[in-house]
Image (tube, rainbow, N blue to C red):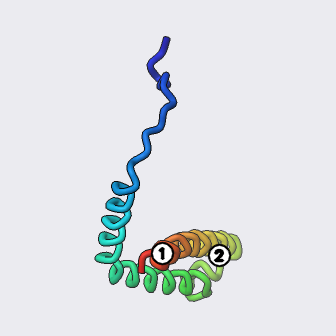
Amino acid sequence: MSDLYPHDSAFYATTPQEQIIDEASMKSKVKGALPFIEELMERLESRITFYDTLSSIPDEVQLIPEDFMHTVAANKLAARNLRQELTWITTLYEQYK
């Protein structure tokens, strides 16, 4: 028989006291990083704004319709991905601030 999968499905939960200590440790780590997180959120917002504008597309690409459309699609995708990251980071920030 393979040892790939565990044969025991028991889950050993930590005690409530350990959970409180772990939570406090996590909060202190995040609180120490709050200024960095705020800077990161501002940076992401500025990048999202940049990718949503036409100024993010180089002039030489604007003259070639096919390249222009590819660049617009790529920028929209980049902005969408950055928004998702910003949402996740904002949730973390709000949870621990």
**Image height of 31 relative to 25, above or below:** below
As helix, strand or loop, the secondary structure at mark 1 comes to helix
Quote the CA–CA distance across marks 1 and 2: 34 Å
- Taking depth in this image into account, of 95 and 20 the one nearest to the observer is 20
The picture places residue 16, in percent across and down from the top left corner, at 40, 55
Image quadrant occupied by the C terminus: bottom left
Residue 95, numbered label: 1
Task: Identify the residue at image location x=51%, y=30%.
Answer: 9
**Image height of 74 relative to 16, above or below:** below
Left or right: residue 45 versus residue 74 is left
- Taking depth in this image into account, of 20 and 85 the one nearest to the observer is 20
The picture places residue 76, in percent across and down from the top left corner, at 64, 74
The picture places residue 43, in percent across and down from the top left corner, at 43, 83
Residue 72, numbered label: 2
Task: Identify the residue at image location x=38%, y=50%.
Answer: 15
Left or right: residue 52 versus residue 42 is right
As helix, strand or loop, the secondary structure at mark 2 comes to helix
Left or right: residue 39 versus residue 60 is left
Q: Residue furthest top?
A: 1
- Taking depth in this image into account, of 31 and 63 the one nearest to the observer is 31
**Image height of 43 relative to 73, above or below:** below
* Amino acid under disc 1: Gln
Q: Are marks 1 and 2 in contact (CB under 8 Å)?
A: no
Left or right: residue 13 versus residue 24 is right
Within-10-Å neighbours for mark 1: few <14, some 14–19, many 20+: few
* Amino acid under disc 2: Val
